[in-house]
Image: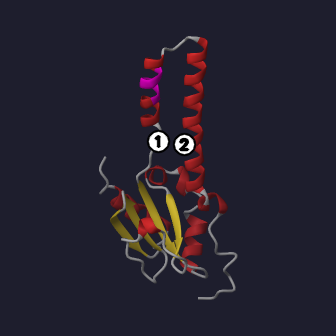
Amino acid sequence: MSTAQTDRDGPPPAVASQESIRMRLQDMQIILYIAIIIFRIWTGAMTLRFAAVFAVFMSLSASVVAAEMIMFEQPGCVWCKRFNEEVAPAWPKTEQGKRAPLRRVNIHDTIPADLADIPVERFTPTFVLVDDGQEIGRLRGYPGDQFFWALVDEMLAKLDP
């Protein structure tokens, strides 16, 4: 695999930062809830007891995504590039992408600590569905967009509803 194409084969910027954007949105949602509670207490529209119950309820209602689709990739991977062109732009907008946001991991970089129990293969791309740190399913390679979606649906069906 050629390393000359490394810059062009990188992940699309919108997909690469999806997890950090989701975390920032969740933080902003919590800050908004706190601001609403403070305003209502200040204006007398809410008692402290109700504010505490409201705060607990709102913090629990913040969306938490436990499942992730890990994409193990490497620079110069032509099948990773094809995935980036055919599927990656649509992934975050799909039901599959909402249930399991895409997280990219370069197999030549240090593997994140939360993925230490997930076996890493040298074959890329490898897609691993992970839920609460446990591997649910694995897809080795990229079989093209039509087969990919069907295989991903099979993996997602293994998640608890």
Please identify the quadrant where the N terminus is shown: bottom right
Q: Label 1 belongs to which residue?
A: 63
Q: Is residue 65 left or right of residue 135?
A: right
Q: Position of residue 69 (x, y in %)?
A: 45, 62
Bin the neighbour count of mark 1 within 10 Å (Cα to Cα): few under 14, some 14-19, many 20 and up.
Answer: few
- Above or below residue 139? Residue 160 is above
User: Magenta residues, as a range?
Assistant: 51-55
- SS for callout 1: loop
Q: Position of residue 153 (x, y in %)?
A: 38, 58
- Above or below residue 78? Residue 50 is above
Q: Label 2 belongs to which residue?
A: 26
Q: Position of residue 157 (x, y in %)?
A: 32, 55
- Mark 1–mark 2 CB contact (< 8 Å): yes
What residue do we see at 52% from left, 70% from top?
105
| Furthest residue in direction top, as rendered | 44
In the image, what residue type sits under mark 1?
Answer: Ser
Bin the neighbour count of mark 2 within 10 Å (Cα to Cα): few under 14, some 14-19, many 20 and up.
Answer: some
Q: Earlier in the sequence, mark 1 or mark 2?
A: 2
Image quarter of residue 123? bottom left
What residue do we see at 46% from left, 66% from top?
70
